[in-house]
Each structure stands twice: as structure tokens, then as C-alpha cells.
Image (cartoon, rainbow, N blue to C red):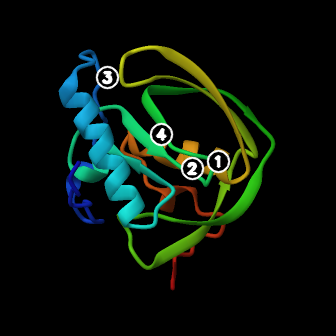
Amino acid sequence: MALRNIVKLGDPILNKKSRVVEKFDEKLAVLIDDMLETMYNSDGVGLAAVQVGILKRVVVIDVGEGPIELVNPEITLEEGEQRESEGCLSLPGKYGVTVRPKKVQVKAQDRIGKWHVYTGEDLKARAFCHEIDHLSGVLFTSRLANGKLEEI
């Protein structure tokens, strides 16, 4: 495993759409392992491949319940609404209150291509939505409740 550099706000890659993963091979497994190590090293709860400069539909998340690998994720259900503070490893030191679903269901593949369904509420729902947004080139700043970005 290796630490990867996290792309910061201002890099145009953050606004690009990620491509569907079609090859489930050792290269994908290495990317996922590196993303997990990078996320943990940065004290994050989620990381999308685009944030390490790779335009593939790959996300890793850990909200304290163990790592979740999402390849080609799709949100299949959204319920309720929550307004909570959110930050991003690509915007260090900045945060803002976002509007997100309170509960989501996500369908995704793992590193070997097997499909899984995950349900998340509260922080986990926010993490799923935040990271899956990255795959479409959308940053959390476009989901701000009051349009204000704060500094820590």
C-alpha cells in the first residue's frame, strides 16, 4: 500500500465525471488499498478515486464501522433530510452545513465485481452521498444549506 496525493480544490479533475470500472484486477485492488491508507492517514471518513487523480467510479468509506469499498456505486433510495456540517479532504480546513438525505441505499460492486447493497443513515448517508457526488464532478459546496463555506 502507498499514500497517494489528494487533489485540492482548483484542480479541474475534481469537476470531471468518473468512468465506469470494467476491469476487476490487481490494479483496482491496489488503488482501493492505497485509497484506504490515504483516507485513514488524512483522518477522513471517505475518499473518491478522483480525489487521488483517478477518473474511475471507486469510493472508500469508513465512518467507524469498518471499511466499505464501493465500485460503480448508485444511490437507489433516498429518504428524509438532514442538515449537518460537512468537510472534504480536497478542501482542507473548510466546512459547511449541507442538505442531504437522512437515509440512503446504495448498490455497488466490490473489488472483485460482486454486487452488494448498503444502507446508511446520518453520517454514513452523508458520506455515501458526498463521495458518490465526487464521481459526477460535484463538490459538497454545491449542496450548502446557506451558501456559506466556513474555515476551521
Residue picked out by circle 3 = 20
Q: Residues within 10 Å of mark 1 (few under 14, many from 20)?
A: many
CB-based contact (under 8 Å), mark 2 and mark 3: no
Find numbered disc 4 in the image and state the secondary structure of the residue it sits on. Answer: helix
Please indicate whether residue 32 sits to the left or right of residue 117 in the image.
Answer: left
Q: Nearer the viewer, mark 4 or mark 1?
A: 1
Find numbered disc 1 in the image and state the secondary structure of the residue it sits on. Answer: helix
| Alpha carbons under labels 4 and 1: distance apart | 12 Å
Q: Residue furthest bottom?
A: 152
Residue 136, relative to residue 117: is it above or below?
below
Residue picked out by circle 1 = 124
Q: Which mark is residue 132?
A: 4
Residue picked out by circle 2 = 127
Q: Measured from the top left, where is residue 57 in percent x and y?
A: 35, 31
| Alpha carbons under labels 3 and 4: distance apart | 12 Å
Residue 25 in view? yes
Q: Measured from the top left, where is residue 50 in percent x and y?
A: 29, 45
CB-based contact (under 8 Å), mark 4 and mark 1: no
Residue shown at the point (42%, 48%) measured from the top left: 138
| Alpha carbons under labels 4 and 2: distance apart | 8 Å
Q: Residues within 10 Å of mark 4 (few under 14, many from 20)?
A: many
Residue shown at the point (45%, 35%) measured from the top left: 69
